[in-house]
Image: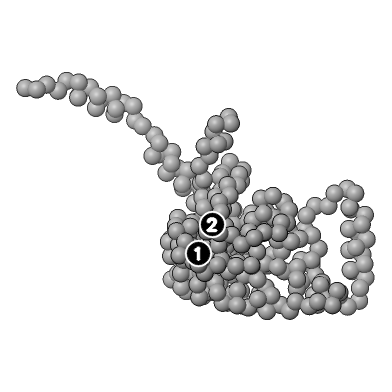
Amino acid sequence: MPESSKMRKPDVKVVLLGDTNVGKTSLLHRYTERKFKDTISTVGGAFFLKQWGPYNVSIWDTAGREQFHGLGSMYCRGAAAVILTYDVTNWQSLAELEERFLSLTDTANHDCIYAVVGNKADLTDTKAYLSQETPDANQTESEEHRSDVLSACPTPPASPVSISGVTFPKQVTREDALAFYGRILRYKGSDERTSLPAEKMCFETSAKTGYNVDALFEALFDLVLPSMLRKRNENQQSATVDLEVCRKGGGKRGRSTCC
């Protein structure tokens, strides 16, 4: 029913954290709207509700600017998953995650899941430069031709944009991200042997081409499924009224007298 769709309640919360200009909003637009949009810096925070199967996932896009830093812990309250986002061409954006943003997750759920995501991979990685979107029928032939040209190139460029003479060196390696994930676990007091492995929780994405964006969100949603089920059960129990108890209680009140 239309009314029920308007009144949907989120089953679980996912929060994006990271410095300004790392592409958090663009990642969210790519996943929810299937396209890349030039965006302006988020002010405060923005809320999106994503239908994932029978579940409703609230995704919070937070501001990276320091003037809104204090709001981050409020947005993280009750989060089942946090996406810590950096720019693969900017080492400082990874350092900021540890220095400014990690402490904001103290208000997240005790079993919160953390993903470390390096965005803008299309600037440094040829395979990320090619769109991961399913091509239209009209584009299939040209895309195949383009792939043939790239595969025929004996020495692919280190960066896809270096063809135009502009180079974006990769400042944050995958090893840097894996090491940061280990420090997150130590900060949280989690046992690395029983926690989700770093190799599974570190991603490199491109909001511009769609590279790995679906893989990131779908993997997270799969992992937070237990939290969704638990919250749904809690909501159902809190909304349940035992009519028999109410009738008995009402009967006792009706028999009470002033004597």
Which residue is rendered at x = 52% and y = 74% of the image? Answer: 98
Q: Quadrant of residue 258?
A: top left
Position in image of residue 114 (x %, y %): 54, 64
Q: Is residue 181 left or right of residue 118?
A: left
Secondary-structure class at tag 1: helix
Q: Nearer the viewer, residue 203 or 46?
A: 46
Say whether marks 2 and 1 touch (CB < 8 Å).
yes
Quadrant holding the N terminus: top right
Display colour scheme = one colour
Amino acid type of the residue tagged 2 in the rendering = Gly
Position in image of residue 58 (x %, y %): 55, 50
Which residue is rendered at x = 58% and y = 31% of the image? Answer: 2
Q: Is residue 68 visible?
A: yes
Read off the residue under disc 2.
45
Mark 1 surroundings within 10 Å by alpha-carbon count, few (fewer than 14), some (14 through 19), many (20 or more)? some
Mark 2 surroundings within 10 Å by alpha-carbon count, few (fewer than 14), some (14 through 19), many (20 or more)? some
Q: Is residue 136 above or below residue 93?
A: above
Which residue is rendered at x = 75% and y = 73% of the image? Answer: 124
Amino acid type of the residue tagged 1 in the rendering = Phe
Which residue is rendered at x = 56% and y = 77% of the image? Answer: 95
Q: Nearer the viewer, residue 106 or 71?
A: 71
Position in image of residue 26 (x %, y %): 67, 59
CA gap, disc 2 and disc 1:
9 Å
Q: Nearer the viewer, residue 33 or 191?
A: 33
Position in image of residue 60 (x %, y %): 55, 55
Read off the residue under disc 1.
68
Q: Is residue 191 visible?
A: no
